[in-house]
Image (tube, rainbow, N blue to C red):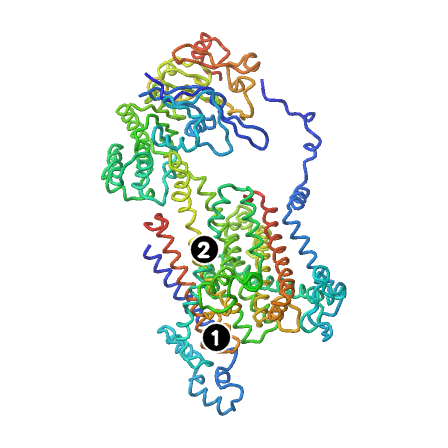
Amino acid sequence: MSAILEVENLRVEIPVATGTLVPVRGISFSVQRGETLCIVGESGCGKSLTSLSIMNLLPKRAKRTADRLRLGGADLQTMDERTMSDIRGDRMAMIFQEPMTSLNPAYTVGNQLEEAFLRHRKASRREARERAVFLLEKVGISAAASRLGQYPHQLSGGLRQRVMIAMALMCEPELIIADEPTTALDVTIQAQILHLLASLQRELQMGVMLITHDLGIVARVADRVAVMYAGEIVETGTVHEVFSRPLHPYTQGLLRCIPVPGKTRRGAHLGSIPGVVPALFGDPTQCNFANRCEHAVPACTAGPVPLTGLGEGRGYRCVLPVETCIANQARPVAA
Amino acid sequence: MLAYSLKRLVLAFLVVLTVSGITFTLTNAAIDPAKALAGESATAGDIEAIRKAYGFDRSYLVQYFDWLGGALTGEFGESFRMRRPVATLLAERLPVTMTLGLCALAFALLVSIPLGVVAALKPNSGVDRVALSISVLGQALPTFWFALMMIILFGVVLRWLPISGSDTWLHFVMPSIALGYYATPAFMRLTRAGMIEVLASDYIRTARAKGLRAPTVLFKHALRNAIIPVVSLAAVQFGFMLGGSVVIETIFALHGVGFLAWESISRSDIPVVQAIVLLISLFYIVLTLLADLLNAYLDPRIRVA
Amino acid sequence: MSTSTVIGPGRLSPGQMLAPTPGALLRRRVFGHRSLMFGIIVLGLMLLMAFGAWFIAPHDPYAQSLATRRMPPIWHAWFWDDPKATWDHVLGTDKVGRDYLSRLIYGARISLLIGVATMLLSGIIGTTLGVLAGYFGGRVDLVVTFLITTRLSMPVVLVALAVVALYGSSLEVVILVLGFLLWDRFAVVMRSVTMQARSLDYVTAAQAIGCSTSYIVVREILPNILNSLVVVATVEMANAILLEAALSFLGLGVQPPLPSWGLMLSEAKEDMFFSPWMITLPGICLFMLVLSINLLGDGVRDVTAPENRN
């Protein structure tokens, strides 16, 4: 397998009145062809900024740096905006969280789909139209041809998100970045959309980077997982490893928050992690999770904690040895 | 939508009725039309005779409905001063005023929309500050004085433009600028605010994520949405410009409706004054209605709802 | 266990220890606001001119003199060696020999009088209608909205011109006409602000403890909409001043020999090609007065609602 997306030591800095915010603090990961990487974390941990920084769609004030940022061998860092815009929508595409507001209210669905194709391909209006109909059918929209003339406000949220997915697929990208694509939708629609994404990915052999805070989604669609906390990746691994043997106390806490049918007793306490994510000024000087961690030891606050690699993409960011971490997982939650 | 349109129409009709009533009352209560018509040398007998002949002795309500009925069929009576049908006079003068109004509106929009867009692209930058300063200064500039200063500069010192009359398109340059500049600050602020809001919206991010080029994002996706409120304002401003043309046309001796209004007002030519006030009010009412329709066309969300 | 830096009294700088009072904060915002300060200073000078006119003006603004007709301002002596320009008439004289500086100083009185009086009259009409509509809603609101629509569809300049011409032009008529024509913005703004204020918790609370309607309007709602009122008032005052000048310029406003700036412009029209300063000076006065009022209004809005600044 070859990596479509390689990210090494990606940082995002935002200067504000009281200092410099660093919401993404040197993260590294890669996405392989035909693979789904899920980036998990609670809101405000830097997931969305990570995806926007890959697309180079960060807000103007934000600054991006990285040791390595390549899409299928092309260096995204040295690209000017013009070359970058050639790649966006063509070789990598993005699906956003808010289907209700992500389509332009002034133009028809067809117009917005076709323009993505016409921008990157030498094609006639008719070919673009045919492609749009083809993809709308592919994402499961009935009467696709007649939908082309409709305006976004005439469609439901689920339909709009399907349109957004079709739009992302217009030029058969190698990489799709989906930023919480189902958060704004009803639960039943969520399942449909995820199923659709997964089957399209298998069929087209795309790399998918799925950003979510929902571990249920991760369990269903991910091949590999990266858990983010306070702008850092605190644990990575295959979905099986991370779910069956979580190492980082934060991951363990997250997993305790979801009920498992048949395992969680009725009336039993669901876990929760007390405290909030710390403000992300400057670079970390200690473990960011220490103030919320039930297993914290003095070493946690002594200095920044590096990511310990365990081989084959498995890694965790904790001062405790692997054995202790595994033992911790079995320990009942402190009252 | 139909019920709403119907309600708007009824409201518009009631407004027209009220405006006509106010206009008729205000003008007729001020002076005796028979005296005005008879002239200064007329005897009491002459005035009485005129009063009878023109029906000024009838009750006020009868006169009003007589006038309104005529107005509805485009019959505004005869000018006291020029002894010609008011409708004909208006028809002669209207093209000049319409040309002036449209040129002024075009000038205002051509200046303000690009300025607003540029200001919105870089808020708080030098360009933004300059645009904002221009709008603050422009708002404080008396229109007629600005017109006079232009006459001195371009008409007398530089001799680039003619200073009075309405023979060629050159005659319309200064009047259009003088009439139009006053609306530019409002247009500019609205465009700027709209663009800033739209540029931060999710669908602009989508458009950029598709890889669209900056001009396409800016003009096709952003401006189209930011311009919608400007259209409503343009209709309203056009109505105001027709009303304001009286000052500008008088200064530049443009023989339009405004100039006619000034002449008729200073000579108490009541039928003409009544007709012009009613006509311009009517224009305003129709324009605001049209603005709503145009909005519905530009914003599909309104169109279908 | 806390890992964040400890914040204790020892760590606070003296500035942080003494938190500024709301009044000090407001003062800081006012004095830090350059355009607001400019507006206040210029408007202050205009007020000084208006109230101290009899003391400041070097000549009687009405005194005509055949010997001193159309004298140029003093800078004509500096740049063009014009012997007619003298310090006695710093800004020159008009076509009947009246001192221009004195007339400009007295003119501030007329503009300010018209501005304030019109603003008060239209403010009373508009605020009453707007507050009534906003507070009672329903049919009252419907009637007021209809009145506003009707008023907006009547062309201000044209109606003002016609009424002033037909009923005789004088200072009082101009004020009355403008007052009855410029209330719409007050009504529109006050209506929406009242609607908002009405739904606020403290108004509901006042209703719940049985306060009378008039008590609620005067004690609870009015203070809260004062900011908006001040902003609209400055806009309409500037508007009234400009309209009076336009009416007087067309010869249908304030009547001679009153030194209205608009009327001075009208009288100087025939001399504009040979004595352009005659037309420049009153225009600059008008411009500065209107600018200062507008800047005051914008500044008040900025200072009282800093979160609304863009």
The residue lying toward the viewer, choosing from B64 and C58, is C58
Looking at the image, the residue that sits furthest to the top is A323
Q: How far is mark 1 from mark 2, CA to CA?
A: 31 Å
Q: Quadrant of residue A16?
A: top right
Circle 2 SS class: helix
Mark 2 chain: B
Q: Amino acid at mark 2?
A: Leu
Q: Position of residue A51 (x, y in %)?
A: 42, 27
Residue at image coords 32%, 20% = A33
**Is tag 1's residue or tag 2's residue first in the polypeptide sequence?**
1
Q: Are marks 1 and 2 in contact (CB under 8 Å)?
A: no
Measured as percent of width and height from the top left, residue C129 is found at 52, 61
Q: Which residue is mark 1?
A: B25
Q: Is residue B273 above or below residue C307?
A: below
Tell whether C290 sits left or right of A169. Answer: right
Asked whether residue B117 is in view, the answer is: yes
- How packed mark 1 is, by other alpha carbons closer than 10 Å (few <14, some 14-19, many 20 or more), is some
Residue B216 pos. (x, y %) = 39, 41
Would you name the residue on which mark 2 appears? Answer: B233
Q: Chain of mark 1?
A: B
- Helix, strand, or loop for circle 1? helix
Judging depth in this view, the residue of B296 and B249 nearest the camera is B249
Residue A266 appears anywhere in the view: no
In the rendered view, tell whether residue B109 sits above or below residue C2.
below
